[in-house]
Image (cartoon, rainbow, N blue to C red):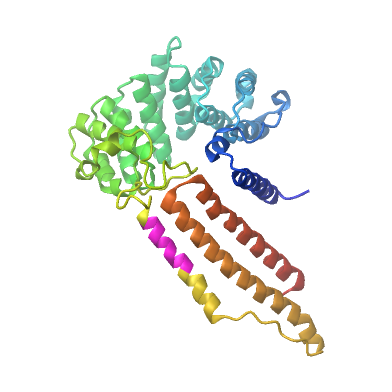
Amino acid sequence: MAAPTERFLQLYIFEKAGQVERLLRGESPQLLSEAPRCLPPYVDLQNLTGDSLVRAVRRAALHPWRDARFWRRAAEHVSALDPQKLPGRDLAQVCLAFKRVDFPSTVLSQHCQQYVQSNYQNLNTFELAAVLSYFCFAGAGLSGGDEFIRAAADEAVNDWRLRETVPWSAWRMLVTAAAEAGIDHQRLFGVAAPHLARNVKFMSGKDVVDVCGAFAEFRFKHHGLLGEVSRFLPAMGLSGPEAAALEASFQRLEFEAPWLLRIPEEIKKSSTSRAGYWGQPDAEFNWCELDYQLVDWIAEPVNTASCLVMVALPLMFLATHEARIEENTGNVLNARIVPVKVLATLDNTVIGWLEVAIALGSILFHATLRYPMQLADEIPMLWQHATQARLGAVSDRTGF
C-alpha cells in the first residue's frame, strides 16, 4: 500500500493528466473547473468519535463535492455525543469545517450553545472563538442568542484568559462574529485591536476587509490597527471588490488611506478580475499582484519578470556542465561507482531542463492567468519531483 503522500501525488497527477487530455480534445477548461471531479467517499459517522470524527468532517469540508445529507447527519451525530466525551478542540474543528462549507445547522448551533454554557471554562480562547463564530453564522436567530453571544464575548476577555497566547485568527473570528450578530462589545474590540494590529502583515486581503468591516460596523476607530492596515495595503493584492469594501470601511471610520485612492474606480467596481489581451483569467490561483496594471498583454508583469531568473540559472548550469558516461575500467571499486555517477549526471541534466520547462510554464501562467497555462506550470513541477524522488531512492539503495 502506497504511503499517503505518494497516493495523493498519484491522484493529483492522474487528475491533471485527465484534464490535459480533455483540453487536447478541445473541451472547455471552464467546464472542467466547474464540474465536480469525483464523488466523496462514503463515511459511516455512527461509529466515529473523537479524532476519527473530526478527520472525516474536515476531509469532507476540503472535498469539492458538497453532500447536504452528509452534513445534516454529521450535525445530528455531533449533537448526540455526550459533551463530556467531546473535547472542545474537536467541537471547534467541526464548527470550522461547517463554516468553511457555509452549511447552517440549527441542531449544531443549539448544541454549541449548550456546550459553551456548561463547559466554557474547559475551552481555550481559540476554541471559544470558533464555536461562537459558527453560532453567529447559523444560530443567531435562536431564542436567547444575543444574550449567549454577549456572555461568550465577556468570557473571551476575562482577565484570566488575557494571559493566554491567543492567535490573531481567534480575535478576527470574535470581532467579525460580534459584528455579524450586531453586538457592540466595546471591551472585546478594544482588547482585540492591538493583537490584530501586530499581525496585519500575516493577514490576507479578505481577513483585513472582514476585520475593518467589523470595526466600521460600530465606528470603533483604532488608529494603531488602521495605520498598520494602511501600511501593508500595497502587499495585500486586494481584488476590486475588496478594495471597494475596505475604502467604504475607512470612510465610515473617517480614516484616510492614500494608497486606496490610487486604485482606479473601474477596478473597484468590477466584481471579477480584469480581462486583458489573453481574456478573462480563469486559473485556479490569482496571486497578490493586480491584473493588467502596467500593460494590457501581461497579467502580472512583476511575477512574469521574476521568472526570467528561473530560466537563466538552469541554462547557465547546462551550458557549463557536460553529461558524460564514464567507461568501466574493470576495477571493482570503479564498477560499483560508475553506474551511480552515470545516473546522477543524467538526472541532473534532466532536472536542469525540467527547471527550464517550469520557468517557461510560470512565465506563461503569470502572463495570462489562464487555466491551460496553469497546467503548463504545474505538470513540469510534478515531473521534477518524480525525478528527484527517483534519484533519492537510487542514492539510498546504493549508498552514494
Q: Residue furthest front?
A: 26
Q: Residue at x 63, y 79 (%)?
A: 323
Q: Say which quarter of the image contains residue 51.
A: top right
Q: Residue at x 39, y 26 (%)?
A: 177
Q: In this image, 164 relative to 341: left or right?
A: left
Question: Can residue 271 be seen?
Answer: yes
Q: Say which quarter of the image contains residue 15.
A: top right
Taking depth in this image into account, of 312 and 100 the one nearest to the observer is 312
Q: Position of residue 29 (x, y in %)?
A: 54, 40
Taking depth in this image into account, of 49 and 259 the one nearest to the observer is 259
Number of callouts: 0
Q: In this image, 311 relative to 264: left or right?
A: right
Query: Would you place residue 105 above or below residue 391 in this image?
Result: above
Query: Would you place residue 163 above or below residue 140 in this image?
Result: below
Query: Would you place residue 313 above or below residue 213 in this image?
Result: below
Q: Residue furthest top?
A: 143
Q: Position of residue 124 (x, y in %)?
A: 48, 33
Queried whether the magenta region covers residue 303, the answer comes back as: yes
Queried whether the magenta region covers residue 13, the answer comes back as: no
Q: Position of residue 185 (x, y in %)?
A: 31, 24
Magenta region: which residues?
Answer: 302-311
Question: Can residue 192 be seen?
Answer: no
Q: In this image, 146 relative to 386: left or right?
A: left
Quarter holding the C terminus?
bottom right
Q: Say which quarter of the image contains residue 159.
A: top left
Taking depth in this image into account, of 221 and 231 the one nearest to the observer is 231
Q: In this image, 308 relative to 268: left or right?
A: right
Q: Main secondary structure of the magenta part?
A: helix
Q: Position of residue 74 (x, y in %)?
A: 63, 23
Q: Residue at x 67, y 47 (%)?
A: 14
